[in-house]
Image (cartoon, rainbow, N blue to C red):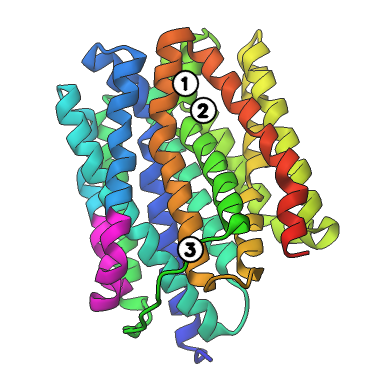
Amino acid sequence: MLSSTDRPAGLLATRLAFFVAGFGFASWAPLVPLAKERLAIDDGVLGLVLLWLGVGSAVAMLVTGAANARYGSQTIILGGGLGLALILPWLVVASTPLCLGAVLFAFGVSLGSIDIAMNVHGTEVERAAGRPLMSGFHAHFCIGEVAGCAIMTTSLSLGTDALAPTLICSALMTIALGLAWPRFLATGRTEQRLGFVLPDRGVLLIATLAAMTFLVEGAMLDWSALFLVDQGLVSKAHGGFGYMLFSIAMTAGRLGGDAVVTRFGDRATLMFGTLPIMAGFAALLAAPVGAIAMAGCLLIGLGAANIVPVLCRRAGKQKTMPVCLAIAVITSAGYTGMLVGPAIVGLISNMAGLPWAFAMLGVLLCAVTLVAPIVMADWH
């Protein structure tokens, strides 16, 4: 158990790490329409450029586990967080698609590194505290998303140059990391080696559903502002409000997620959690005014909030492979969804229009509802 002195310090440091990751991640969302205009590119090229954010995150996932074991999660969190802070301003000054892709790749490496390390550290803090804490940690990631998107969108709405709010956001992330640094736990290093175990049908099914859900989250991050602006529902300066509301709803859903699962169970949460998502996409596609579109963003965030936590919980109950490997498969699948999602949306948008791409996302989530009974039956 943690001592009374260490407990709040360890908790605060981990919460700040999750907050910084979400803050930096969401600060990019309102900048997407500005990047498209600055570079004078179409949706197809933009989708390929956005792909490099996911590529960078995927590359980081391949090396961060070993680096975390060697150097400790504290060092990786600091490096990844400072990377986000230092790279963010370059996203608004990159002058060519190639340059922006390279910056997004570096941004993705930083994001993937801090994402894995903060979860490792959170697990250790949770184990030491002897009580569940991970839902609260992930809620702080969502709170960071709301704060980052809100600061960036509000600044752009006031007509400030895009570089100024990115510098402000970078400074805030650096301050938060400075506060967290002396408060991290002294994490141990593990030399445990696990043999390769081929995922069975149940784990692969869960991973597929997680990839679908993360694909939707990635699409909302990279394309929601552009969709709202292109459809004439909001002005360019207010495009980020859609993702901000999406993040607010997801945060609220996760803060209350444990109570929902306790009341209704995993099966009902998974089966019916996708219904608000489909309703939200329907509202976005049919919205005659911005208010209805914003309500759609809220519904999507509310529905998506607890799908992945339920899937992770189900993976933890399977017995065919080590739980840590099962969670790694799901995390990799989620990043794959984030990786290919923006590019797929961009290609469909280039061929048929962005509304058709968003309709595809709504239909895709129907599969989660249809497959939920099978997922629950495997370990019921």
Find out whether the residues at labels 3 and 2 contact each other: C-beta distance under 8 Å. Answer: no
Q: Three-letter amino acid code at disc 3?
A: Leu
Q: Is residue 72 magenta?
A: yes
- Relative depth, front residue between 117 and 245: 117
Q: Which residue is mark 2?
A: 241
In the displayed structure, 135 sits above or below 195; it is above
Question: Where on the picture, by quarter, is residue 114?
Answer: bottom left
Is 99 left, or right, of 181 in this rendering?
Answer: left
Q: Residue furthest right?
A: 263
Picture coordinates of residue 240 (x, y %)?
46, 27
Which contiguous range is marked in magenta? 60-82
- Tag nearer the camera, 3 or 1: 3
Q: Is residue 107 left or right of residue 268?
A: left
Residue at numbered disc 1? 238
**Mark 2, secondary structure of its residue:** helix
Q: What amino acid is labelled 2 in the image?
A: Phe
Residue 172 visible in the snapshot: no
Label 3 CA crowd tier, 10 Å (few <14, some 14–19, many 20+):
few
The picture places residue 27, in percent across and down from the top left corner, at 37, 39
| Disc assigned to residue 49 | none
Mark 1 and mark 2 residues within 8 Å of each other at the beta carbon? yes
Q: CA distance from mark 3 to mark 1?
A: 47 Å
Q: Amino acid at mark 1?
A: His
Mark 3, secondary structure of its residue: loop
Q: Name the residue beneath numbered marker 3.
A: 198
Q: Residue at x 29, y 58 (%)?
A: 62
Q: Earlier in the sequence, mark 3 or mark 1?
A: 3
Vertical comparison of 141 with 1: above or below: above
Q: Residue at x 29, y 14 (%)?
A: 37
